[in-house]
Amino acid sequence: MALASFILQRLLVYVLVLVVGMTILFFVPRFAPTDPVDAMLAKVTSQSGYMDASQVDSLRQSLSDTFGLSGTLMEQYGAFLRRIFVEFDFGPSLSMYPTPVMELIGNALPWTFGLLLSATVIAWVIGNFVGLLAGWKPESNAGRVMEGLAICLYPIPYYIIALILSVLFSYVWPIFPLATTIRGAPWSWDLVQSIVWNSFLPAMSIVITTFGWWIISVKAQTQSLKEEEFIRYARLKGLSDARLLGRYVLPNALLPQITFLALQIGLMFNGSLITEIIFDYPGLGLLIYTAVLQGDYNLLMGTISLSIVAVATATMIIDFLYPLVDPRIRHG
Amino acid sequence: MADKRAIFKDVPGRMYIGLTLLLIVGTIGLVLPWFTPTDPLEWYASPRNQTPSLDHLLGTTSLGQDIFWLLTWAVRNSLILGVTVAFFSTLIGVFLGLMAGYVGGPLDRTLSFLMDALICIPTLPILILLAALFGGQLSLWAAGIALVIFNWPFPGRQVRAVALSMREREFVNVAWFSGEGQSRILVRHIFPYIAGWSAANFVNTVLVAVATESALAVIGLSSATQATVGTMIYWALEYQALLGERYVWIGAPVIAIVALFIGLFLLSSGLAMRSADRRMSI
């Protein structure tokens, strides 16, 4: 079965990604010039001078567990993996003691997820639609203008677009908020309005920087598809342009776009981290940033492990969409 | 076919625009730093908050640094980082990709899995973690090494795919049966096929490396003792250059980085299209 082996192989890669990622996370603190446990303990005890010996010991234990520093190297590694994959526990946050790290992550994750999902869908749909039309009529002025625009926008980094948007629309012409403040009772229309209002600029900065790539790549796809025999045959049969595009070109042009989407998720995630920090958006990126500023290593290890898991999972889910649109994998 | 030529008709134009942009940015970053009158990083070497004048071409920062000379150093450091990272990523990627594709077997499986895994791991969180562990600042060296580790799989995968298809080609068999060694076949017969694409990828990796480092710098986690385009933006934001209406301070590095990125992208996509064109004609 082609489909079964496709899924199995992909699952294997997924497990491997997680293992490689966590192994990197396990070894990175060992290359640091300072012992993170001592640095952290010194900071915590100096901030709250009333800790007694048993509290310090339990904190040292928790910190050592987080960095996997107790026992032999293999034991440390095993304990580290168990904490991440079995117990889902990163201990208490040190800057917001005693809130568990997982609770903070749980609050932040929906924001990042919602922001990235909506921005990706908007960028993907607009980009592919425009790219398809531009590739169908590459000599038209509209096609040239769109490609030129895409080429100029795509290489510009997220934070530049985010900065420009925030200056233009919350400072020069203040129609959107400078920093995110969500207001409204839970599950009310006000809340939804407030979320959309506050998420608009962060989402736009991701949309603007990603949709250029979709235009460029789907345009190239469409142009080469136009030369294919089956398209020429369909055209000679007298099919309308709309039907040709929708039934013959689009499905074939979209196939590689799904693979690209899977490859781009990591880059988009990087972008959303910076965008969230610039707009003060309460997602995972801001949480990582807070953790760095506060020197909260529990929170830092938790958020970073989780971002690797999240990106790996999202990539796999997108790869699993592939057989849905490509019948060759299902029946081959 | 006339239509096919039309696809590549705009390739040279695109590459010329890209090369022109890169030439301008390259002059700023690689030639002008040799002529700096004083160390532009030094604080209060000039009067603070000057508007552009003949003495200070782009004015000065709130820290009394000359923006023009500071920019030349920033562009230089960003370019050096980008080119170094791209050089080693491409070298490792091409070498391991060729090995995986050409040798095959368990080596290929191991390397392919490793490449697939590394590609899926987001780079920025790892760099942020490194920066936090190194006391809130990541030296350019450490950032460069980390960037190489996460960027070699991109050329590696592509080169592997080409090498894999090459193994079955007639001329490779002919070379093999005429007694040429493995390394000679790799260098003389297979490498020319991937050279064009590798050049495109090299340029693209420069872009990715500079972009990632500057993203780290903009949130204040890159080296503070070295000027890069990103750290320049960081200091400008930190001292409220926007609210203080000192637009040149923040505008200069932003324009430099945008020009650099558009130039790199035009060059890399132009190179990729040209090598795709040549491969099709074979």
Image: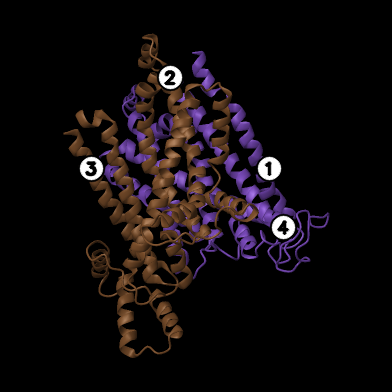
Which label number is shown at residue A9? 3
Marks 3/2 in contact by CB < 8 Å: the verdict is no
Which residue appears at 77% of the width and 59% of the height?
B37
Chain of the residue under the numbered disc 2 shown in the image? A
Which secondary structure lies at badge 1? helix
Marks 1/2 in contact by CB < 8 Å: the verdict is no
Estimate the x, y position of residue B251 in percent, counting from the top left: 67, 52
> Which of the chains is purple?
B
Seen from the viewer's position, the closer of residues B147 and B164 is B147
Estimate the x, y position of residue A265 in percent, counting from the top left: 39, 46
Q: Nearer the viewer, mark 1 or mark 2?
A: 2
Marks 1/4 in contact by CB < 8 Å: the verdict is no
**Which of the two discs, 3 and 2, labels the residue nearer the N terminus?**
3
On the image, numbered disc 1 is attached to which residue? B24
| Disc 4/disc 3 C-alpha distance (Å) | 54 Å
Using the rendered view, name the quadrant where residue A151 is placed: top right
Which label number is shown at residue A285? none
In the orientation shown, which residue stands out farthest toward the left? A1
| Disc 1/disc 2 C-alpha distance (Å) | 38 Å
Marks 1/3 in contact by CB < 8 Å: the verdict is no
On the image, numbered disc 4 is attached to which residue? B67
Which secondary structure lies at badge 2? helix
Mark 2 Cα-neighbour bin, 10 Å: few <14, some 14–19, many ≥20: some
Seen from the viewer's position, the closer of residues B173 and A271 is A271
Give the residue type that dot 1 points to: Ile
Give the residue type that dot 4 points to: Ile
Q: Are marks 4 and 2 on the same chain?
A: no
Seen from the viewer's position, the closer of residues B94 and A108 is A108
Which label number is shown at residue A226? 2
Give the residue type that dot 2 points to: Lys
Give the residue type that dot 3 points to: Gln
Which residue appears at 56% of the width and 58% of the height?
A178
